[in-house]
Image (tube, grey):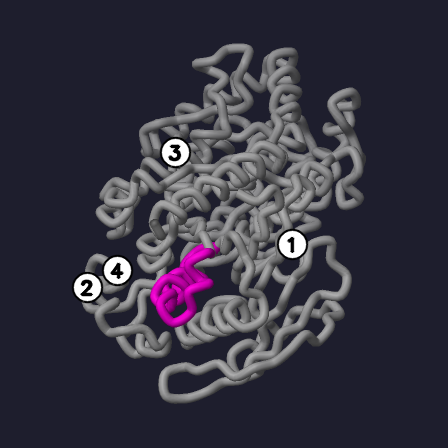
Amino acid sequence: MKSKLKVLFVAAECSPIIKAGGLGDVAGELPAKLRERGADVCVVIPGNKDIKIPARYKTDFPVRMGSRTETCIVREAAESKVPIWIIDNYHYFGRSGIYGHSDDPERFAFFCLAVFEYIKTFEPNFDIVHLNDWHTAPLAMLIRENEKKTPSLSDISIVYTIHNLEYQGISPWDIFTLFGVSGDVFTADKVEFFGSFNAMKAGINYADIITSVSKTSAIQMQTAEFGFGLEGVLKNRRDSLRGVVNGINPNVWNPENDEAIYVRYNRETLHNKKQNKTGLQKELGLEICDKPVCCVVSRLVANKGLDLLEGAVPDIIREGGQFVLLGSGDKFYEETFLMLKKRFPGSVSVNIEFNSQKARRIYAGSDILLMPSRYEPCGLTQLIAMRYGTIPVVHKTGGLADTVTDEISNKGSGNGFVFSKYSLDTFTDLIRKVFSYYRNREDWTNLMLRAMSRDSSWDAPAGEYLEIYGEAVEKNKRRKN
Protein backbone atom coordinates (compact mmCIF):
# COMPACT_ATOMS: atom_id res chain seq x y z
CA MET A 1 0.00 0.00 0.00
CA LYS A 2 1.19 3.51 -0.84
CA SER A 3 2.28 5.62 2.10
CA LYS A 4 -0.02 8.46 1.00
CA LEU A 5 -3.44 7.21 -0.02
CA LYS A 6 -5.41 9.22 -2.55
CA VAL A 7 -9.04 9.28 -1.34
CA LEU A 8 -12.23 10.64 -2.92
CA PHE A 9 -14.88 11.25 -0.25
CA VAL A 10 -18.32 11.32 -1.90
CA ALA A 11 -21.32 12.73 -0.01
CA ALA A 12 -24.59 14.58 -0.54
CA GLU A 13 -23.68 17.39 1.87
CA CYS A 14 -20.61 18.91 3.51
CA SER A 15 -20.46 21.41 6.38
CA PRO A 16 -20.09 24.36 6.38
CA ILE A 17 -20.82 24.69 2.65
CA ILE A 18 -24.15 22.89 2.68
CA LYS A 19 -25.63 20.85 5.53
CA ALA A 20 -28.87 19.17 6.54
CA GLY A 21 -27.69 16.88 9.34
CA GLY A 22 -24.94 14.75 10.81
CA LEU A 23 -23.68 13.52 7.43
CA GLY A 24 -22.74 17.11 6.60
CA ASP A 25 -20.69 17.35 9.78
CA VAL A 26 -18.89 14.09 9.02
CA ALA A 27 -18.08 15.14 5.45
CA GLY A 28 -16.84 18.49 6.71
CA GLU A 29 -14.65 17.15 9.53
CA LEU A 30 -13.43 13.61 8.83
CA PRO A 31 -11.66 14.41 5.50
CA ALA A 32 -9.85 17.32 7.15
CA LYS A 33 -8.61 15.05 9.94
CA LEU A 34 -7.56 12.39 7.40
CA ARG A 35 -5.49 15.01 5.56
CA GLU A 36 -3.83 15.92 8.86
CA ARG A 37 -2.93 12.23 9.18
CA GLY A 38 -1.28 12.19 5.76
CA ALA A 39 -3.99 11.04 3.34
CA ASP A 40 -4.55 12.98 0.11
CA VAL A 41 -8.32 13.51 0.42
CA CYS A 42 -10.76 15.36 -1.84
CA VAL A 43 -14.50 15.77 -1.23
CA VAL A 44 -17.13 15.81 -3.97
CA ILE A 45 -20.73 16.95 -3.40
CA PRO A 46 -23.71 17.91 -5.59
CA GLY A 47 -24.39 21.52 -6.41
CA ASN A 48 -27.20 23.42 -4.71
CA LYS A 49 -28.77 26.86 -4.97
CA ASP A 50 -27.92 27.47 -1.30
CA ILE A 51 -24.16 27.06 -1.82
CA LYS A 52 -22.87 30.63 -1.71
CA ILE A 53 -19.10 30.17 -1.46
CA PRO A 54 -16.82 31.28 -4.30
CA ALA A 55 -15.88 28.39 -6.60
CA ARG A 56 -13.54 28.05 -9.57
CA TYR A 57 -14.60 26.40 -12.80
CA LYS A 58 -12.70 23.16 -13.44
CA THR A 59 -14.33 21.49 -16.42
CA ASP A 60 -17.60 20.37 -18.00
CA PHE A 61 -18.60 17.24 -19.88
CA PRO A 62 -21.66 15.29 -21.06
CA VAL A 63 -23.22 12.63 -18.85
CA ARG A 64 -25.20 9.85 -20.46
CA MET A 65 -28.44 9.02 -18.60
CA GLY A 66 -30.17 6.17 -20.33
CA SER A 67 -31.23 7.43 -23.77
CA ARG A 68 -30.45 11.10 -23.14
CA THR A 69 -27.53 13.32 -22.19
CA GLU A 70 -27.14 15.93 -19.47
CA THR A 71 -24.26 18.36 -18.93
CA CYS A 72 -22.11 18.31 -15.81
CA ILE A 73 -20.17 21.38 -14.69
CA VAL A 74 -17.43 20.81 -12.10
CA ARG A 75 -16.35 23.64 -9.82
CA GLU A 76 -13.84 23.67 -6.97
CA ALA A 77 -14.43 25.58 -3.74
CA ALA A 78 -11.99 28.49 -3.77
CA GLU A 79 -11.33 28.75 -0.03
CA SER A 80 -11.20 25.33 1.60
CA LYS A 81 -8.57 23.43 3.58
CA VAL A 82 -9.74 20.24 1.89
CA PRO A 83 -10.29 20.33 -1.89
CA ILE A 84 -14.04 20.27 -2.46
CA TRP A 85 -15.45 19.62 -5.92
CA ILE A 86 -19.01 20.63 -6.70
CA ILE A 87 -20.93 18.65 -9.34
CA ASP A 88 -23.43 21.00 -10.92
CA ASN A 89 -26.33 20.80 -13.32
CA TYR A 90 -29.02 23.47 -13.44
CA HIS A 91 -31.89 21.05 -14.03
CA TYR A 92 -31.07 18.81 -11.04
CA PHE A 93 -29.23 21.07 -8.60
CA GLY A 94 -30.30 24.62 -9.43
CA ARG A 95 -32.72 24.60 -6.48
CA SER A 96 -32.73 24.83 -2.70
CA GLY A 97 -33.00 21.80 -0.44
CA ILE A 98 -30.56 18.91 -0.45
CA TYR A 99 -33.28 16.27 -0.11
CA GLY A 100 -37.03 15.97 -0.31
CA HIS A 101 -37.60 16.52 -4.03
CA SER A 102 -39.88 14.16 -5.95
CA ASP A 103 -37.07 13.37 -8.41
CA ASP A 104 -34.36 12.67 -5.79
CA PRO A 105 -33.59 9.17 -7.18
CA GLU A 106 -32.95 10.68 -10.61
CA ARG A 107 -31.00 13.64 -9.21
CA PHE A 108 -28.61 11.42 -7.29
CA ALA A 109 -28.36 8.99 -10.22
CA PHE A 110 -27.02 11.92 -12.23
CA PHE A 111 -24.63 12.79 -9.41
CA CYS A 112 -23.23 9.24 -9.32
CA LEU A 113 -22.92 9.07 -13.11
CA ALA A 114 -21.20 12.47 -13.22
CA VAL A 115 -18.70 11.53 -10.50
CA PHE A 116 -18.06 8.24 -12.31
CA GLU A 117 -17.32 10.02 -15.61
CA TYR A 118 -15.08 12.52 -13.83
CA ILE A 119 -13.09 9.77 -12.14
CA LYS A 120 -12.78 7.76 -15.33
CA THR A 121 -11.80 10.68 -17.57
CA PHE A 122 -9.99 13.23 -15.42
CA GLU A 123 -8.96 11.67 -12.09
CA PRO A 124 -8.27 7.96 -12.64
CA ASN A 125 -5.71 7.45 -9.87
CA PHE A 126 -7.75 7.27 -6.67
CA ASP A 127 -6.80 4.47 -4.30
CA ILE A 128 -10.03 4.77 -2.30
CA VAL A 129 -13.51 6.00 -3.13
CA HIS A 130 -15.37 6.49 0.15
CA LEU A 131 -19.15 6.56 -0.41
CA ASN A 132 -21.76 7.72 2.08
CA ASP A 133 -25.43 6.69 2.33
CA TRP A 134 -27.78 5.79 -0.52
CA HIS A 135 -27.25 8.96 -2.55
CA THR A 136 -23.73 7.88 -3.53
CA ALA A 137 -24.03 4.07 -3.29
CA PRO A 138 -24.71 3.38 -7.01
CA LEU A 139 -21.23 4.70 -7.78
CA ALA A 140 -19.87 1.43 -6.35
CA MET A 141 -21.94 -0.49 -8.92
CA LEU A 142 -20.73 1.78 -11.74
CA ILE A 143 -17.07 1.28 -10.83
CA ARG A 144 -17.24 -2.50 -10.49
CA GLU A 145 -19.54 -3.15 -13.46
CA ASN A 146 -17.36 -1.14 -15.84
CA GLU A 147 -13.98 -2.70 -14.98
CA LYS A 148 -13.85 -4.77 -18.18
CA LYS A 149 -14.31 -1.66 -20.34
CA THR A 150 -11.94 0.42 -18.21
CA PRO A 151 -9.43 -1.88 -16.43
CA SER A 152 -7.93 0.96 -14.36
CA LEU A 153 -11.18 1.08 -12.37
CA SER A 154 -10.27 -2.23 -10.77
CA ASP A 155 -7.46 -0.46 -8.91
CA ILE A 156 -10.00 1.63 -6.99
CA SER A 157 -10.93 0.21 -3.58
CA ILE A 158 -14.41 1.07 -2.30
CA VAL A 159 -15.46 1.89 1.27
CA TYR A 160 -19.16 2.46 1.86
CA THR A 161 -20.49 4.08 5.06
CA ILE A 162 -24.10 3.65 6.16
CA HIS A 163 -25.17 6.67 8.21
CA ASN A 164 -28.89 5.86 8.28
CA LEU A 165 -30.08 2.44 7.14
CA GLU A 166 -33.74 3.49 7.12
CA TYR A 167 -33.32 5.62 3.98
CA GLN A 168 -32.25 3.32 1.14
CA GLY A 169 -33.03 5.17 -2.09
CA ILE A 170 -35.59 2.62 -3.30
CA SER A 171 -36.89 3.54 -6.77
CA PRO A 172 -38.49 1.96 -9.85
CA TRP A 173 -36.71 -0.02 -12.57
CA ASP A 174 -36.65 3.15 -14.72
CA ILE A 175 -34.02 4.69 -12.42
CA PHE A 176 -31.85 1.58 -12.67
CA THR A 177 -31.86 1.86 -16.48
CA LEU A 178 -30.25 5.32 -16.28
CA PHE A 179 -26.97 3.78 -15.09
CA GLY A 180 -26.31 1.94 -18.34
CA VAL A 181 -25.20 -1.32 -16.73
CA SER A 182 -26.32 -4.79 -17.80
CA GLY A 183 -29.82 -5.92 -16.89
CA ASP A 184 -28.13 -8.96 -15.31
CA VAL A 185 -27.22 -6.68 -12.40
CA PHE A 186 -30.90 -6.31 -11.49
CA THR A 187 -30.99 -9.44 -9.32
CA ALA A 188 -31.68 -10.14 -5.66
CA ASP A 189 -28.00 -10.79 -4.91
CA LYS A 190 -27.00 -7.37 -6.31
CA VAL A 191 -29.43 -4.41 -6.48
CA GLU A 192 -32.99 -5.70 -6.90
CA PHE A 193 -35.30 -5.32 -3.89
CA PHE A 194 -38.86 -6.66 -4.19
CA GLY A 195 -39.03 -5.58 -7.82
CA SER A 196 -37.45 -2.17 -7.24
CA PHE A 197 -33.92 -0.77 -7.44
CA ASN A 198 -32.31 -0.33 -4.01
CA ALA A 199 -29.43 2.14 -4.16
CA MET A 200 -28.12 1.29 -0.70
CA LYS A 201 -28.05 -2.40 -1.56
CA ALA A 202 -25.69 -1.55 -4.43
CA GLY A 203 -23.30 0.08 -1.96
CA ILE A 204 -23.43 -2.88 0.41
CA ASN A 205 -22.91 -5.54 -2.25
CA TYR A 206 -20.20 -3.83 -4.31
CA ALA A 207 -18.04 -2.22 -1.60
CA ASP A 208 -14.82 -3.83 -0.38
CA ILE A 209 -15.54 -2.68 3.19
CA ILE A 210 -18.83 -1.45 4.65
CA THR A 211 -18.86 0.70 7.76
CA SER A 212 -21.55 1.81 10.16
CA VAL A 213 -21.24 4.91 12.32
CA SER A 214 -21.00 2.96 15.58
CA LYS A 215 -19.95 -0.49 16.66
CA THR A 216 -23.32 -1.30 18.20
CA SER A 217 -25.27 -0.26 15.10
CA ALA A 218 -23.02 -2.50 12.97
CA ILE A 219 -24.34 -5.41 15.04
CA GLN A 220 -27.94 -4.19 15.34
CA MET A 221 -28.41 -3.64 11.60
CA GLN A 222 -28.00 -7.37 11.04
CA THR A 223 -31.25 -8.00 12.96
CA ALA A 224 -34.85 -7.82 11.74
CA GLU A 225 -35.63 -5.07 14.27
CA PHE A 226 -33.00 -2.66 12.97
CA GLY A 227 -32.18 -3.99 9.48
CA PHE A 228 -35.07 -2.33 7.59
CA GLY A 229 -35.25 -5.26 5.21
CA LEU A 230 -31.52 -5.38 4.48
CA GLU A 231 -30.50 -7.46 7.50
CA GLY A 232 -29.99 -10.56 5.34
CA VAL A 233 -27.80 -8.64 2.86
CA LEU A 234 -25.71 -7.28 5.71
CA LYS A 235 -25.40 -10.70 7.35
CA ASN A 236 -24.06 -12.04 4.05
CA ARG A 237 -21.38 -9.33 4.15
CA ARG A 238 -20.72 -9.35 7.89
CA ASP A 239 -17.05 -10.28 7.37
CA SER A 240 -16.64 -6.93 5.58
CA LEU A 241 -18.74 -4.88 8.01
CA ARG A 242 -17.04 -2.55 10.53
CA GLY A 243 -18.29 -0.02 13.07
CA VAL A 244 -16.58 3.34 13.67
CA VAL A 245 -18.10 5.87 16.08
CA ASN A 246 -18.30 9.39 14.65
CA GLY A 247 -16.48 12.28 16.25
CA ILE A 248 -17.07 16.02 16.56
CA ASN A 249 -14.77 19.00 16.21
CA PRO A 250 -13.79 19.95 19.78
CA ASN A 251 -12.80 23.44 18.65
CA VAL A 252 -16.19 24.13 17.11
CA TRP A 253 -18.11 22.70 20.09
CA ASN A 254 -16.31 24.35 22.98
CA PRO A 255 -17.97 26.42 25.73
CA GLU A 256 -14.63 28.10 26.38
CA ASN A 257 -14.71 30.00 23.07
CA ASP A 258 -18.37 29.77 21.99
CA GLU A 259 -19.56 33.29 21.13
CA ALA A 260 -23.22 32.22 20.95
CA ILE A 261 -23.58 31.43 24.67
CA TYR A 262 -24.20 33.88 27.49
CA VAL A 263 -21.02 33.30 29.52
CA ARG A 264 -18.04 31.22 28.43
CA TYR A 265 -16.68 28.52 30.70
CA ASN A 266 -14.46 25.45 30.91
CA ARG A 267 -13.82 22.67 33.42
CA GLU A 268 -12.02 25.09 35.75
CA THR A 269 -14.78 27.74 35.56
CA LEU A 270 -17.75 25.37 35.51
CA HIS A 271 -19.62 27.62 37.93
CA ASN A 272 -20.26 29.97 34.98
CA LYS A 273 -22.59 27.37 33.50
CA LYS A 274 -25.21 28.52 36.02
CA GLN A 275 -25.25 31.98 34.40
CA ASN A 276 -25.99 30.31 31.07
CA LYS A 277 -28.93 28.52 32.70
CA THR A 278 -30.33 31.81 34.01
CA GLY A 279 -29.84 33.44 30.62
CA LEU A 280 -31.61 30.58 28.86
CA GLN A 281 -34.55 30.68 31.26
CA LYS A 282 -34.92 34.43 30.65
CA GLU A 283 -34.69 34.05 26.88
CA LEU A 284 -37.26 31.24 26.73
CA GLY A 285 -39.71 32.64 29.28
CA LEU A 286 -39.13 29.94 31.88
CA GLU A 287 -39.27 30.43 35.62
CA ILE A 288 -35.80 31.50 36.79
CA CYS A 289 -34.85 28.94 39.40
CA ASP A 290 -32.49 26.02 40.06
CA LYS A 291 -34.86 23.34 38.80
CA PRO A 292 -33.13 20.83 36.51
CA VAL A 293 -33.56 21.92 32.88
CA CYS A 294 -34.08 18.96 30.51
CA CYS A 295 -33.47 19.70 26.84
CA VAL A 296 -34.14 18.05 23.50
CA VAL A 297 -32.34 19.22 20.34
CA SER A 298 -33.59 16.99 17.56
CA ARG A 299 -35.40 16.44 14.31
CA LEU A 300 -39.01 15.70 15.19
CA VAL A 301 -39.39 12.24 13.68
CA ALA A 302 -40.70 9.05 15.23
CA ASN A 303 -37.38 7.22 15.63
CA LYS A 304 -36.15 9.93 18.05
CA GLY A 305 -38.35 8.51 20.82
CA LEU A 306 -40.84 11.35 20.72
CA ASP A 307 -43.61 9.12 22.08
CA LEU A 308 -41.56 8.66 25.25
CA LEU A 309 -40.72 12.36 25.44
CA GLU A 310 -44.37 13.37 25.07
CA GLY A 311 -45.37 11.00 27.85
CA ALA A 312 -42.49 12.07 30.12
CA VAL A 313 -43.04 15.83 30.07
CA PRO A 314 -45.83 15.84 32.72
CA ASP A 315 -43.62 13.70 34.98
CA ILE A 316 -40.67 16.05 34.46
CA ILE A 317 -42.77 19.03 35.54
CA ARG A 318 -44.36 17.13 38.44
CA GLU A 319 -40.91 16.06 39.70
CA GLY A 320 -39.72 19.68 39.73
CA GLY A 321 -38.00 20.01 36.36
CA GLN A 322 -38.27 22.19 33.26
CA PHE A 323 -38.41 21.08 29.62
CA VAL A 324 -36.91 22.76 26.54
CA LEU A 325 -37.29 21.50 22.97
CA LEU A 326 -35.65 22.80 19.80
CA GLY A 327 -36.35 21.19 16.44
CA SER A 328 -38.75 20.73 13.57
CA GLY A 329 -40.14 17.90 11.48
CA ASP A 330 -43.34 15.89 11.60
CA LYS A 331 -46.30 18.28 12.00
CA PHE A 332 -48.05 15.88 14.38
CA TYR A 333 -45.14 16.08 16.82
CA GLU A 334 -44.73 19.82 16.38
CA GLU A 335 -48.36 20.36 17.38
CA THR A 336 -48.14 17.79 20.19
CA PHE A 337 -45.27 19.59 21.91
CA LEU A 338 -46.76 23.04 21.31
CA MET A 339 -49.84 21.82 23.21
CA LEU A 340 -47.58 20.79 26.10
CA LYS A 341 -46.11 24.30 26.10
CA LYS A 342 -49.63 25.75 26.51
CA ARG A 343 -50.39 23.21 29.24
CA PHE A 344 -47.29 24.04 31.30
CA PRO A 345 -46.51 27.76 30.86
CA GLY A 346 -43.27 28.84 32.48
CA SER A 347 -42.05 25.25 32.70
CA VAL A 348 -42.02 24.14 29.06
CA SER A 349 -40.43 25.92 26.08
CA VAL A 350 -40.99 24.54 22.57
CA ASN A 351 -39.07 26.09 19.70
CA ILE A 352 -40.14 24.77 16.29
CA GLU A 353 -37.17 25.85 14.22
CA PHE A 354 -33.64 25.05 13.15
CA ASN A 355 -31.47 27.60 14.95
CA SER A 356 -27.84 26.67 15.45
CA GLN A 357 -27.07 29.64 17.72
CA LYS A 358 -30.03 28.94 19.99
CA ALA A 359 -29.01 25.27 20.08
CA ARG A 360 -25.64 26.28 21.52
CA ARG A 361 -27.31 28.34 24.24
CA ILE A 362 -29.57 25.40 25.05
CA TYR A 363 -26.59 23.05 25.36
CA ALA A 364 -24.82 25.55 27.63
CA GLY A 365 -27.86 26.43 29.75
CA SER A 366 -29.42 23.00 30.27
CA ASP A 367 -28.56 20.41 32.89
CA ILE A 368 -29.80 17.25 31.16
CA LEU A 369 -30.10 16.15 27.52
CA LEU A 370 -32.88 13.65 26.77
CA MET A 371 -32.25 11.22 23.87
CA PRO A 372 -34.63 8.25 24.16
CA SER A 373 -34.20 7.29 20.48
CA ARG A 374 -35.72 4.00 19.33
CA TYR A 375 -32.54 3.64 17.30
CA GLU A 376 -29.65 6.03 16.71
CA PRO A 377 -26.91 4.91 14.28
CA CYS A 378 -24.43 7.22 16.01
CA GLY A 379 -25.82 10.51 17.26
CA LEU A 380 -23.77 13.67 17.63
CA THR A 381 -26.07 15.55 19.98
CA GLN A 382 -25.01 13.56 23.05
CA LEU A 383 -21.34 14.20 22.21
CA ILE A 384 -21.96 17.94 21.87
CA ALA A 385 -24.00 18.09 25.09
CA MET A 386 -21.20 16.42 27.06
CA ARG A 387 -18.74 19.04 25.82
CA TYR A 388 -20.99 21.63 27.49
CA GLY A 389 -21.35 19.68 30.74
CA THR A 390 -24.95 18.76 29.96
CA ILE A 391 -25.61 15.17 31.01
CA PRO A 392 -27.19 12.80 28.46
CA VAL A 393 -30.02 10.43 29.36
CA VAL A 394 -30.20 7.93 26.51
CA HIS A 395 -31.74 4.69 25.31
CA LYS A 396 -29.18 1.90 24.96
CA THR A 397 -29.02 1.66 21.19
CA GLY A 398 -26.52 2.31 18.39
CA GLY A 399 -24.00 5.05 19.01
CA LEU A 400 -25.71 6.08 22.24
CA ALA A 401 -24.73 2.73 23.73
CA ASP A 402 -21.15 3.21 22.52
CA THR A 403 -20.63 6.76 23.80
CA VAL A 404 -22.60 7.10 27.05
CA THR A 405 -21.51 5.19 30.17
CA ASP A 406 -24.25 4.76 32.75
CA GLU A 407 -23.41 6.43 36.04
CA ILE A 408 -25.86 4.36 38.10
CA SER A 409 -24.26 1.04 37.20
CA ASN A 410 -20.74 2.55 37.01
CA LYS A 411 -20.77 4.82 40.05
CA GLY A 412 -18.02 7.41 39.86
CA SER A 413 -16.97 6.60 36.28
CA GLY A 414 -20.10 7.32 34.20
CA ASN A 415 -20.70 10.28 31.92
CA GLY A 416 -24.48 9.99 31.64
CA PHE A 417 -27.46 7.73 32.25
CA VAL A 418 -28.68 4.79 30.14
CA PHE A 419 -31.92 2.78 30.05
CA SER A 420 -32.32 -0.51 28.17
CA LYS A 421 -36.04 -1.28 27.90
CA TYR A 422 -37.84 1.06 25.50
CA SER A 423 -40.88 1.98 27.58
CA LEU A 424 -42.33 5.10 29.15
CA ASP A 425 -42.21 3.62 32.67
CA THR A 426 -38.53 2.77 32.35
CA PHE A 427 -37.72 6.22 30.94
CA THR A 428 -39.62 8.23 33.55
CA ASP A 429 -38.28 6.05 36.38
CA LEU A 430 -34.75 6.85 35.23
CA ILE A 431 -35.53 10.57 35.01
CA ARG A 432 -36.66 10.53 38.65
CA LYS A 433 -33.37 8.86 39.62
CA VAL A 434 -31.42 11.44 37.60
CA PHE A 435 -33.25 14.29 39.37
CA SER A 436 -32.32 12.74 42.71
CA TYR A 437 -28.70 12.51 41.57
CA TYR A 438 -28.85 16.15 40.42
CA ARG A 439 -29.65 17.29 43.95
CA ASN A 440 -26.29 15.93 45.20
CA ARG A 441 -24.23 18.84 43.94
CA GLU A 442 -20.81 17.27 44.51
CA ASP A 443 -21.68 14.08 42.62
CA TRP A 444 -23.36 16.07 39.83
CA THR A 445 -20.36 18.38 39.44
CA ASN A 446 -18.00 15.41 39.17
CA LEU A 447 -20.33 13.86 36.60
CA MET A 448 -20.25 17.06 34.52
CA LEU A 449 -16.47 17.16 34.69
CA ARG A 450 -16.21 13.56 33.44
CA ALA A 451 -18.64 14.29 30.62
CA MET A 452 -16.65 17.35 29.55
CA SER A 453 -13.42 15.34 29.63
CA ARG A 454 -14.58 12.66 27.18
CA ASP A 455 -12.47 12.63 24.02
CA SER A 456 -15.04 12.86 21.23
CA SER A 457 -12.62 14.26 18.66
CA TRP A 458 -11.99 12.77 15.22
CA ASP A 459 -8.47 11.60 16.18
CA ALA A 460 -9.34 7.98 17.00
CA PRO A 461 -12.02 7.55 14.28
CA ALA A 462 -9.66 8.94 11.62
CA GLY A 463 -7.05 6.38 12.65
CA GLU A 464 -9.65 3.62 12.38
CA TYR A 465 -10.67 4.78 8.91
CA LEU A 466 -7.06 4.80 7.73
CA GLU A 467 -6.78 1.19 8.89
CA ILE A 468 -10.03 0.38 7.08
CA TYR A 469 -8.71 2.01 3.90
CA GLY A 470 -5.64 -0.22 4.10
CA GLU A 471 -7.86 -3.24 4.65
CA ALA A 472 -9.99 -2.28 1.64
CA VAL A 473 -6.92 -2.01 -0.56
CA GLU A 474 -5.73 -5.47 0.48
CA LYS A 475 -9.20 -6.94 0.05
CA ASN A 476 -9.46 -5.47 -3.44
CA LYS A 477 -6.06 -6.91 -4.37
CA ARG A 478 -7.25 -10.37 -3.32
CA ARG A 479 -10.44 -9.90 -5.32
CA LYS A 480 -8.53 -9.02 -8.47
CA ASN A 481 -6.16 -11.97 -8.06
Residue 374 to residue 332: above or below: above
How far is mark 2 from mark 1, CA to CA?
40 Å
Range drawn in magenta = 131-155
Residue 387 to residue 472: above or below: above
Mark 4 in CB contact with mark 3 (< 8 angstroms): no
Structural crowding at the residue carrying mark 3, measured as other residues with C-alpha within 10 Å and reported as few (<14), some (14–19) or many (≥20)? many
Among the two numbered marks 1 and 4 on one chain, the one whose residue lies closer to the N terminus? 4
Residue position marked by numbered label 4 in the rendering: 190
The mark found on residue 216 in the picture is 3
How far is mark 1 from mark 4, CA to CA?
41 Å
How far is mark 1 from mark 3, CA to CA?
30 Å
Indicate the position of residue 388 as horizontal and vertical percent values: 67, 32
**Tag 3's secondary structure?**
helix
Residue position marked by numbered label 2 in the rendering: 194
Among the two numbered marks 2 and 1 on one chain, the one whose residue lies closer to the N terminus? 2
Q: Residue at x 31, y 65 (%)?
A: 170
**Tag 4's secondary structure?**
loop
**Furthest-front residue in this view:** 481
The answer to which of 415 and 148 lies nearer the viewer is 148
**Tag 1's secondary structure?**
loop
The answer to which of 302 and 111 lies nearer the viewer is 111
The mark found on residue 472 in the picture is none
Callout in the foreground (1, 3):
3
Is 11 in the magenta? no
Q: Amino acid at mark 4?
A: Lys
Residue position marked by numbered label 1 in the rendering: 355
Is 140 in the magenta? yes
How far is mark 4 from mark 2, CA to CA?
12 Å
Q: Residue at x 64, y 15 (%)?
A: 446
Q: Residue at x 23, y 64 (%)?
A: 192
Callout in the foreground (1, 4):
4
Q: Amino acid at mark 1?
A: Asn
